[in-house]
Amino acid sequence: MTNDNVQNRTRAGSAGAVEAVVAAMSSHPLNVSVQREACVALEIMTDADLQNQTRAGDAGATEAVLAVITAQPLSASTQFAVRFALAMLTRGNLVNNPRVVDAGAVGALNTALASIQGTNDTDYRDNIRALLLLLAPP
């Protein structure tokens, strides 16, 4: 509905869809499917939309997405969803980027990276490294 449709993305944000997604994440912290799909929804609604990025940040989306990283081992599809959700939430957003860093993202990602040292999980390692680069100061 909002993918590739800027007008619908704006309408969805104005109607409270961003806050509803964050609320769903908070209400279902251990449901991997809800977390993954919520990250995908946040990615779509905040892509190049500063108002929705701000709404998401104010609603606690940055912290909710970060919680997904630390809550459970992540499947490849969830890893990608988290990566892209954080990318859209923080890209060009001078408020959300420090918010994610202040919420402990770098430490959480480094802990996740350390937990897979010595394994062959190169996709997960690459996703974590990409997120760390995304959060690095300019």
Image (cartoon, helix red, strand yellow):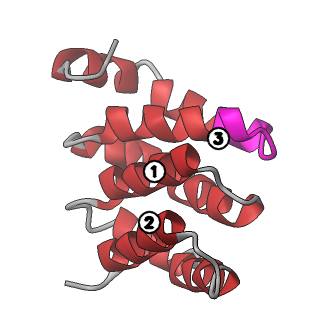
Rendered view: 3 above or below 89: above
Rendered view: 32 above or below 118: above
Disc 1 and disc 3: Cα gap in Å?
A: 12 Å
- The secondary structure type at the circle numbered 2 is helix
> Tag 3 or tag 1, which sits nearer the N-term?
3
Front position among marks 1 and 3 = 1
Q: What amino acid is at disc 1?
A: Phe
Q: Is residue 43 left or right of residue 31?
A: left
> Tag 2 or tag 3, which sits nearer the N-term?
3
Question: Which residue is at a point 31% across and 50% down the rendered structure image?
Answer: 88
Q: What amino acid is at disc 2?
A: Asn
Residue lying furthest front: 120
Residue 70, image quadrant: bottom right
Q: Is residue 39 left or right of residue 85?
A: right
Dot 3 corresponds to which residue? 35
Specify the quadrant that holds the N terminus: top left
Q: Position of residue 108 (x, y in %)?
A: 62, 78
Give yes or no for residue 110 being in the magenta stretch: no
Question: Which residue is at a point 72% across and 60% down the rendered structure image?
Answer: 73
Question: Which residue is at a point 43% across and 57% down the rendered structure image?
Answer: 83
Q: Position of residue 125 (x, y in %)?
A: 50, 74
> Tag 2 or tag 1, which sits nearer the N-term?
1
Disc 1 and disc 2: Cα gap in Å?
A: 7 Å
Crowd band around label 1 with a 10 angstrom C-alpha radius: few (<14), some (14–19), many (20+): some
Dot 2 corresponds to which residue? 127
Crowd band around label 3 with a 10 angstrom C-alpha radius: few (<14), some (14–19), many (20+): many
Magenta stretch: dominant secondary structure: helix
Question: Which residue is at a point 37% across and 27% down the rendered structure image?
Answer: 13
Write down the region rendered in magenta. 25-35
- The secondary structure type at the circle numbered 3 is helix
Q: Position of residue 127 (x, y in %)?
A: 44, 66
